[in-house]
Image (cartoon, rainbow, N blue to C red):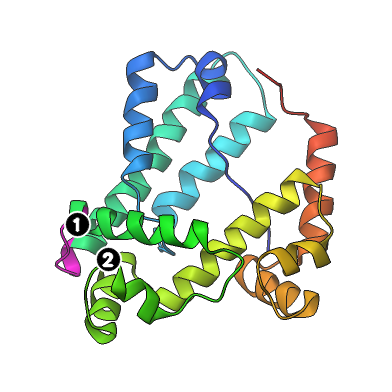
Amino acid sequence: GSRFFLQIDLYELKPKIGLSSEECELIQQLLTQFIPRVISPGNHFKTPFLQLLHEHRNNHQFSTLNAKAYLFQIINCLYQTQLQYLKSANVIQSEALQMIDEVDKYIAAKLDEIIKTADLAKLFDLSEAHFRRKFLASAGTSPIKYCAHKKLQEARRLLEENHLSISEIALKLNFSSSQHFSSNFSKSFSIGPAEYRKELLKAFRKSPLKKT
């Protein structure tokens, strides 16, 4: 199947598709309140996403207006899917965000270490079992899987910077080997780290990002 990466840069979007300051603030607020997790919005997401790609590839006089509309559909779809999940899990959004924010700060400071569930539970003065249940309900995944995902997200960022080799990234993030890192990266993103970097460079050459 096809692979697509959607990255929203409000600094680029604002002048390109005519977002007002109020609209930018609204989008930022929605994205700030979005809890990173694997969700399945189905065709409610796929349809406007493919339409957005179509507008990008087939520029015409209404492309800017249409792209703006599809962007809002995508963001609203993700946000509504999250609200439905939290309601079904009986989780208060503000509490979930607070817990995940604390965990994110801890992970960011310990990316080069092995992080255990017990270490995270201590942050909230909870037993390991109680914390695991609360975190699973809030984030939709276990603490260990979440930590692994955050490390791989950092790995993706490092690959985009193109300064470190794959072996250096694996060492920096405390993977046992570059092979172990590559295997985990491939399982999460359906593409190996070397291929991911190549595709990014290819995309950059076709459409370089503007520096502001």
* Residue at left offset 76%, top offset 57%: 196
Query: From which residue to which does the magenta span run?
Result: 87-93
Numbered mark located on residue 40 in the image: none
- Which residue is the site of mark 1? 95
- 22 drawn magenta: no
> Residue 127: image x %, image y %?
23, 83
Looking at the picture, tell me which residue is in the foreground, 203 or 133. 133
* Residue at left offset 58%, top offset 71%: 113
Q: Earlier in the sequence, mark 1 or mark 2?
A: 1
- Which residue is the site of mark 2? 138
Kindly state the secondary structure of the residue where label 1 is placed.
Answer: helix
Q: Quadrant of the C terminus?
A: top right
Amino acid carrying mark 2 in the image: Ser
Residues under numbered marks 1 and 2 in contact, where contact means CB atoms less than 8 Å apart:
yes
* Residue at left offset 72%, top offset 28%: 209
Kindly state the secondary structure of the residue where label 2 is placed.
Answer: helix
**Residues at marks 1 and 2, CA–CA distance in whole angstroms:** 8 Å
Q: Seen in the image, is 99 located left or right of residue 146?
A: left
